[in-house]
Amino acid sequence: MVKIITEVWISIIMKLQARETLRAVARKFKMSHPGVRKILNKFQETRSIENLKRPVRRSLLTDRAKRIICKQCIKEPFQSAKSIYALSNIDAKVSACTVRRVLRSCGLFSRRAVNKLLLTQLNIVKRKKWCKDYSIFRPMEWNQVIFQTNAGWKWYLVAVG
């Protein structure tokens, strides 16, 4: 429901207590009549226009458990949320979503994979060998080489002259 100013609520309740119809009050305040009905029902149940505080559900994790989860994540930064929970040795049973929520509250926003080297040792050796083998090519010889692009094979015709 849209947040309504307290003065508007009071005037809606006063109009309804003055025996005006729901639809007439709704038209006057440019609201839907079910919205006006909700305001009336709320007033009849609570005898107040103030929002009641909702009962807060007790957290499954203590502050200590939350700190342990955050420390475990800092110690093992490449672990998943489930494995961080398993490594933390916490008594409470919580989901991976709860662990991620705790990590976000500590300022740790995402899990990421381990950095993988782009070149293995074998690839480095092969590249060095290739560079040594073809370092003696002159521009004329390079013009006769066929290059491959991501779009497939492209043939480049070079005018020799």
Image (cartoon, rainbow, N blue to C red):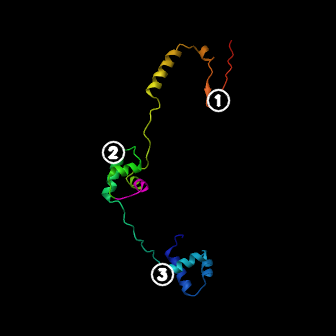
The residue drawn where x is 64% and y is 29% is 152
- Characterize the local packing of mark 2: few (<14), some (14-19) or many (20 or more) Cα atoms within 10 angstroms: few
In the rendered image, the quadrant that contains the N terminus is: bottom right
Bounds of the magenta span? Answer: 92-100
Q: Which residue lies furthest to the bottom in this view?
A: 19
On screen, residue 91 versus residue 31, left or right, reads: left
The residue drawn where x is 50% and y is 79% is 42
Vertical side of 123 occupied by 35: above or below: below
The spot of residue 43 in percent (x, y) is: 49, 81
Q: Which mark is residue 152?
A: 1
Q: Which of 17 and 8 is in front in this view?
A: 17
Q: As shown in the figure, which amino acid type bears the numbered disc 3?
A: Glu
Q: Could you say whether the residue bearing mark 1 is in a helix, strand or loop?
A: strand
Of mark 1 and mark 3, the one earlier in the sequence is 3
- Characterize the local packing of mark 1: few (<14), some (14-19) or many (20 or more) Cα atoms within 10 angstroms: few
Separation of marks 1 and 2 at Cα, in angstroms:
46 Å
Q: Residue 75 carries which label?
A: 2
Separation of marks 2 and 3 at Cα, in angstroms:
52 Å
Q: Could you say whether the residue bearing mark 3 is in a helix, strand or loop?
A: helix
